[in-house]
Image (cartoon, helix red, strand yellow):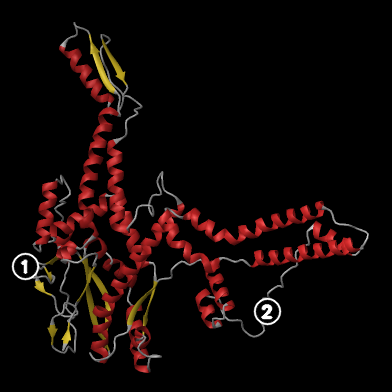
Amino acid sequence: MILDQFGRRVRELRKPVRSEVSKVSIKDRWSTYPSRGLTPERLASILLLADQGDVTSQSELFEEMEEKDTHLSAELLKRKNAVNSLNFGIAPYGEGSKLKEKPDKKDEKVADFCRDVLFSMPDFEDSLFDLLDAIGKGFAASEILWDVDGSNTVITGLKWIHQKRLTFVKDFSPRIITDQNLFGEEIPPFKVVYHRHKARSGYDTRAGMLRVCAWMYLFKNYSIKDWVAFCEVFGMPLRLGKYHPGASTDDKDALVTAIQALGADAAGIISDSTEIEFVEAMKGSTKENVYKALADFCNREISKAIVGATLTTDVGEKGSYAASKTHNEVRLDLVKSDSWSLANTLRMQVLRPLVGFNFGWDAPVPWFQFHLQEPEDLKTLSEVYKNLVEFGQPVSAEHVRDRFGIPMPEEGETLLQVRGPEQPAAPASLKMIMKSAKRDENRFSQEDVDNLSRDGAIAANRAVSALLKPVLDMIEGAESLEEIGEKIYTLYPMLDGKEFEELLAKAMFAAGLTGYAAAEADED
C-alpha cells in the first residue's frame, strides 16, 4: 500500500504526472489589497473566511503585511534565513537512521542518485526559501516538475505556488484552484510539495505566524496613521494670514492662495495691506509619545511571536548583552524545529517519490539533513575533557578531534609539546628563611613570620580568585537568583583548585621549615 503526501491511498505508480497543474494565470498578479482601510471588523471577517477554507483574502493580507511592516518583514526573514543559510546534505538510509553500523551499497547508490538530481536543479536553495514561506503563512506549496532522462525519472525544478491558488473549502486537504474550477482540483499524488509549518496544533489555515501577528499589525497601523496625522497638524508651523478690516474680497482670496502656496513652495503674492504670520508648533513636551509607545509595544509582541524573544532584535534601554545572548539561545530551538520540519517534508515528498519511481517503492528512502552547529564554549569544553581524563574516564583522540574540529597530525608534521610547569619564584621571606637556616648564628624574629604570612596571603588571594572565576562570571551574567541557583551546581567540574593546593602545600612546608630552623637555633 502506498500513501501519498496527503495520506491518500494510491495504486503503485510507475510514472509521475508531467503536465503542469498550477499554470500561471493573469489573475495571480491581481490583489484586492485587503489591508487598505483595514478595520477590526474587516480583519475578523478575513480570518473567518480562512477558517471556512477560503484563504484568498488572508493570503493577500499576509503578503501585504510583509510588504508594509518593516519590523515584521525583518523578523520573518530572520527565521527563514536562519534555516536557508545552513549547509545541507543527503545521507544514506542506514547512516541517517543509525539502524545499521554502516550503510550498504544499495543505500549509498540511492543517496548518490538523489544528490545528483537535487543538487543539479537550478535555484534549489531558492526553492527551499519558497517552502519556508510556510513559517509566516502556515503552509507553502511548490509544484514538482518531473521529466524523464533515459531510463531515469528526474526532477527538473520546484515551481512556487501562491497560497491564494489553494483552497480548503471541500475538505482539510489543499486543492488547486483553476479557471475552470473555483472549488479546486484534487492534487495528483507526488505532484506538489506541501510544507505545513506546525507552529501549533490545528488546521493549516490557522497555523501561520502572521495569523498571530495580524492584530498587532492592525493596532500598529492605526498608531502610525495617527502619528503621521499628528505630525502634519502639530509638526508644521501654522500659516496664519491677517488682513485689515477694509480688505476687499480679492485681497482675501489672494491671501488664501498665498497661504496655500506656502505649504508647497514657500512663495506667494499678496497685497501690501495684508500680513502673514508663522506660528510655530510647540517643539518640546514632557509627555510620553503614546503613538511611539504603542508602535514599540506592537513590535515587541511581534518579535515574541516570530523569534520567541525581543532582545535578539533590539537590546533596548534596559537590555543587556547577557540577556540578549540568552534569548539568542532560545532562537536556536526555533532553527532546529524549522530545519527538522522542512527536512522531513523534503524527505517524504521529494526524495520518497524520486526513489519510488527509480528504485521501487520498497527501497529505503535516504535522509535530507540540515547541518546545524551549536555554538560552544571550547575553553569550558576542554576543561571538562581534561577533568574527565584526570578522573580516569577513557576518551579517544578521534572523538576529541571530531568535537573540536582539529585534524589528526600527519607524518612529518611538527607536534606541539606541553611545556613543563615553571617553578614560581620563592617569596622574599622564604629566601631569607633558607638563607638563615644555613647560619646558626641567625635567629628568627616575629618580623620574619609576619613577612611569610603576608606573602602567603597575597598568593592565596590570587589563587582563590582563579578558583572562583567561573562562579563570578556566572553570577555576573545571570538575570535572577533562580538562575544562579540552577547553574551553581553545574560549575563544580570547572573549579580548578590546583594552584591553591600547591600554595597551601608550600606554605605548610615553609612554616614547618621555619619552626624547625627556629628550634635548632634555640638549642644552640
Task: Quote the CA–CA distance across marks 2 and 1.
Answer: 72 Å
Identify the disc placed on residue 414.
Answer: 2
Q: Residue placed farthest to the bottom in the image? A: 105
Q: Residue placed farthest to the top in the image? A: 246
Label 2 residue SS: loop
Q: Which residue is drawn at the image coordinates 32% and 76% (left, top)?
A: 121
Compared with 247, 49 (above or below) is: below
Quadrant (top left/top right/bottom left/bottom right) for the N terminus:
bottom left
Task: Name the N-terminal-most of marks 2 and 1.
Answer: 1
Circle 1 sits on which residue?
183
Q: Nearer the viewer, residue 53 or 162?
A: 53
The answer to which image quadrant residue 76 occupies is bottom left
Seen in the image, is 252 located left or right of residue 132?
Answer: left
Q: Which residue is drawn at the image coordinates 14% and 79% (left, top)?
A: 188
Compared with 216, 456 (above or below) is: below
Seen in the image, is 498 located left or right of residue 296?
Answer: right
Q: Alpha-carbon neighbours of circle 1 within 10 Å: few (<14), some, or many (≥20)?
A: some
The answer to which image quadrant residue 144 occupies is bottom left
Q: At label 1, which amino acid type do we have? A: Phe
Q: Which of 22 and 419 is in front in this view?
A: 419
Q: Are marks 2 and 1 in contact (CB under 8 Å)?
A: no
Label 1 residue SS: loop
Seen in the image, is 64 located left or right of residue 458?
Answer: left
Q: Residue 211: x percent and y percent? A: 20, 57
Q: Residue 228: x percent and y percent? A: 26, 36
Of marks 2 and 1, the one in the foreground: 2
Q: Which of 478 and 274 is in front in this view?
A: 478
Q: Residue 233: x percent and y percent? A: 25, 29
Q: At label 2, which amino acid type do we have? A: Thr
